[in-house]
């Protein structure tokens, strides 16, 4: 992997950890950081043997949102340039949604505004005790961005999303778990070990089937039942021809753990 200045990327045993690495500014999100996130996601997508990706933040915060200097710079642009600039900025960080393997956000501290939208684009979210999460855009005079108004209702429902988006309030990690925004809350010292445990469980499963299942989870959201059945049948038709399925069946008969190779 390349060397980055605003993020870190580590890969071990098929699991990558992408860390936002501007702790002195609570990982405030800049275009330079976003470009590195996008580049890293492209590199990881092409990495042989990758099974899962964890994203987290260095220091006390996950991400405090967009850096104010960047926001202020955008105010000086003509209206059409503002629109294009912001959409470009969103897509840099939302490259995490294009990674074909499961992604886990380990929310180590406050995730605010765009700093919450980044983990919203991941497949799983766990949070450290004491972390606060929220889409506070309207409290700054901004419409939600970076997919917040699209992603949040799909996770917590329209009513709860309306509460969070229209008030701009922050929720503690425990409330975030209660409304389905995160699936687990753990002590801070257990956050990364727990994320790695989840990633290891995923990594032990058949990688072709896991990638297919991730894709279907999202594409089937807007599908009819017949369309979803077609997708499932198409994917299973591929799986029936894999060595992994034969290994899975053999392991089940022999009452042992399978060893999947993605073949």
Image (cartoon, grey):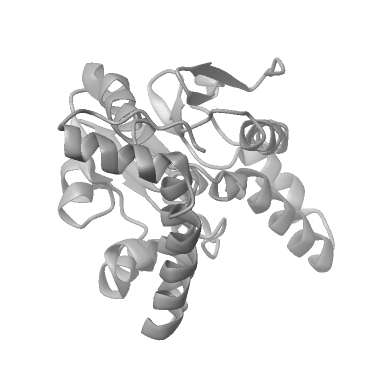
Find residue 155 and report its image quarter: bottom left
* Residue 143 located left or right of residue 221: right
Q: Which of 209 and 151 lies nearest the eye of the viewer?
A: 209
Q: Position of residue 3 (x, y in %)?
A: 70, 15
Between residues 83 and 203, which one lies in front from this camera angle?
203
Q: Where does residue 20 sit, x and y in percent of width and height?
A: 53, 26
Residue 131 visible? The answer is no
Residue at point 30% right, 49% down? 170
For the N terminus, the image quarter is: top right
Q: Quadrant of residue 82?
A: bottom right
What percent of the width, then of the height, locates residue 79? 79, 67
Left or right of residue 205, residue 174 in this image = left
Q: Which residue is drawn at the image coordinates 50% and 45% (left, top)?
A: 118
| Residue drawn at the location 67% of the way across and 45% of the way down | 92
> From what the image shows, is residue 114 above or below residue 104?
below
Figure disc tally: 0
Q: Position of residue 221 (x, y in %)?
A: 41, 72
Q: Is residue 161 above or below residue 135?
A: below
**Residue at (61% x, 37% y) in the render:** 67
Classify residue 56 by image quadrant: top left
Residue 30 shows in this picture: yes
Is 192 located above or below residue 211 in the figure? above
Q: Nearer the viewer, residue 227 or 189?
A: 227
178 relative to 249 in the view: left or right: left
């Amino acid at each position: 992997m390349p060397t980055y200045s605003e993020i870190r990327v580590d890969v071990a045993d098929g699991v990558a950890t992408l860390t936002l690495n501007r702790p002195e500014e609570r990982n405030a999100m800049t275009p330079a950081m976003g470009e590195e996130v996008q580049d890293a996601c492209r590199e990881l997508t092409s990495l042989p043997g990758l099974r899962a990706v964890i994203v987290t933040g260095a220091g006390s915060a996950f991400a405090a949102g967009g850096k104010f200097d960047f926001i202020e710079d955008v105010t000086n642009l003509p209206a059409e340039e503002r629109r294009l600039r912001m959409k470009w900025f969103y897509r840099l960080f939302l490259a995490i949604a294009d990674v074909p393997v499961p992604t886990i956000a380990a929310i180590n501290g406050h995730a605010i505004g765009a700093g919450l939208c980044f983990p919203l684009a991941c497949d799983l979210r766990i949070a450290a005790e004491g972390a606060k999460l929220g889409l506070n855009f309207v409290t700054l005079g901004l419409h939600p961005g970076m997919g917040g108004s699209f992603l949040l209702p799909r996770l917590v429902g329209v009513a709860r999303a309306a509460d969070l988006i229209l008030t701009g309030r922050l929720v503690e990690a425990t409330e975030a778990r209660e409304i389905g925004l995160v699936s687990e809350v753990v002590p801070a010292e257990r956050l990364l070990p727990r994320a790695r445990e989840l990633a290891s469980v995923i990594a032990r499963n058949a990688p072709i089937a896991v990638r297919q299942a991730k894709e279907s989870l999202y594409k089937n959201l807007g599908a009819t039942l017949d369309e979803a059945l077609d997708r499932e049948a198409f994917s299973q038709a591929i799986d029936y021809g894999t060595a992994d399925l034969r290994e899975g069946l053999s392991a089940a008969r022999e009452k042992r753990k399978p060893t999947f190779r993605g073949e």
